Image (cartoon, rainbow, N blue to C red):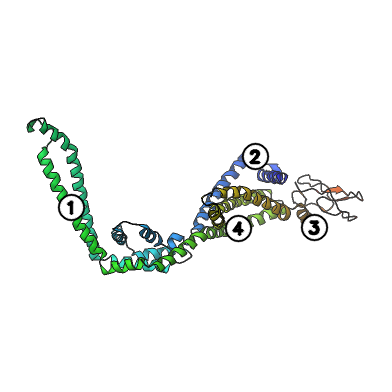
Amino acid sequence: MFASIRRLLNQFFRKSRTINNEPLNKVSLIVIILVDIFILINVFTGLDNISRWHISPTEAYPCYSEWQNYRVKNTKDKDYEIVKLSFPYSPNNQFSFQQSYQQGEIAHLGKVNQICLKYGEYKDKINNQQNQQIIKTIEQKQEKISNLEQTNRNIRAKYDSTLLEKIAGQSREQSINQVGAEKAKQQLDQNDRQISTLRQENSNLQKDLVAKPESTSFLSFIRDENQFTEVEKGYQKALFWYPSIQLGFQSLFLLPLIIIALLVHRFAQVRGYGLISLISWHLLVIFFIPLIIKVFEFFQIGAIFQFIIDIIAPIFGGLLFLINYIYILLIPLIGFGIIKFFQKFVFNAKVQAANRVQKSLCLNCAKKIRHRDRHCPHCGYYQYLECENCHLLTYKHLPYCKHCGYFQNSSKTIN
């Protein structure tokens, strides 16, 4: 395994730094690196854009978060709080809630959940001019309450010193405070009464708003367990599959680039176009890097990760760190399998040699040579080896002698 990895790395670095088996000069190497960085940035930008092509779970189920928060709350005014969310923060909002939810479908694949659209329709009915005036009045009264409470805090901060001045018998003219202790106490009591009145008025307004027909219809809708259960199941399902969908679209973006770069690289190798071969090789590597990164991200958050959690959680409870042990064992095995696959099917020496012999190409650099050439005029590679049986020259890397058909145990891989 380690010999295969070392051989692949040597081949990778040699192909990345040479043109026609000659090393790149420093200027050319810098230019190649800058081009690589520019292309890599654009590849990741394209991946980010295409990963958001399909509608996300939060866009497909925009009502889920609010609805779930309402269900878990235990506060006595939670009905008012959910109704209040029917009024947008910005008065200049040009879209209704239902229209805002539908905006998630624009330039995206997938649809917004119909129950959430119904949820938005109920909110839009609450958001009428009369109810907006009630909310505005409540906010104005709440602002007065806040101002009065701040005034009381300022008075209380000075109240202790004025009280000490009175106990000490200090005259009012010598005091450093503008308000005396008696007057401060009167002002505090007056403010507290006003705050209590404003709070009661706000409480009545809130009750009136919640009691409105459009509000009661909305509250009846969100208390329907069957409706929420359907939304929750759909949201959890979308959340489960979304990383897989993203990986699929990202692969759809990268695979054509990888295939084109691979075809251009092979064509350039056959024709002996060294610079094109080098650039296409770099492009091939650049396109593979994001794909590998996205695959590993998928292993961490995708369907496979969730599948492993679903297996481990019931058995070991909170010992989810065991997932890391599984990955530590699983990833090397997957890496070993990938290496074996490329060694056997993609970079297989015997398969490559058979194709190159049929096309009169060098076994090493894949450039055109004459049929009887023993050494490649491009890279100097020796094409033959001596048969173990008849001792005549036969092609390297091919399993049988071309003269006597004897199996060649000493076949070597292409460097």
Label of residue 255 in the image: 4
* Left or right of residue 141, residue 40 in this image: right
Amino acid type indicated by mark 1? Ser
Whichever of labels 4 and 1 marks the residue nearer the N terminus, that label is 1
Can the viewer see residue 112 in this picture? no
Quarter of the figure with residue 198: bottom left
Circle 3 packing at 10 Å, graded few (<14), some (14-19), many (20+), is few
- In this rendering, which labeled residue sits more in front, label 4 or label 1? 1
The residue beneath circle 2 is 25
Q: Which residue is rendered at x = 60% and y = 56% of the image?
A: 257
Give the Cα distance between marks 3 and 4: 29 Å
State the image coordinates of residue 358 (x, y, percent, origin top left).
80, 57
Quarter of the figure with residue 140: bottom left
Quarter of the figure with residue 9: top right
Q: Secondary structure at mark 2?
A: loop
* Left or right of residue 377, residue 18 in this image: left
State the image coordinates of residue 321 (x, y, percent, origin top left).
54, 47
- Is 310 rendered above or below residue 188? below
State the image coordinates of residue 134 (x, y, percent, origin top left).
22, 61
**Could you tell me if the residues under marks 3 and 2 are in contact, i.e. CB atoms within 8 Å?**
no
- Is 149 rendered above or below residue 125? above
Q: Nearer the viewer, residue 44 or 22?
A: 44
- Is 100 rendered above or below residue 413? below
Circle 2 packing at 10 Å, graded few (<14), some (14-19), many (20+), is few
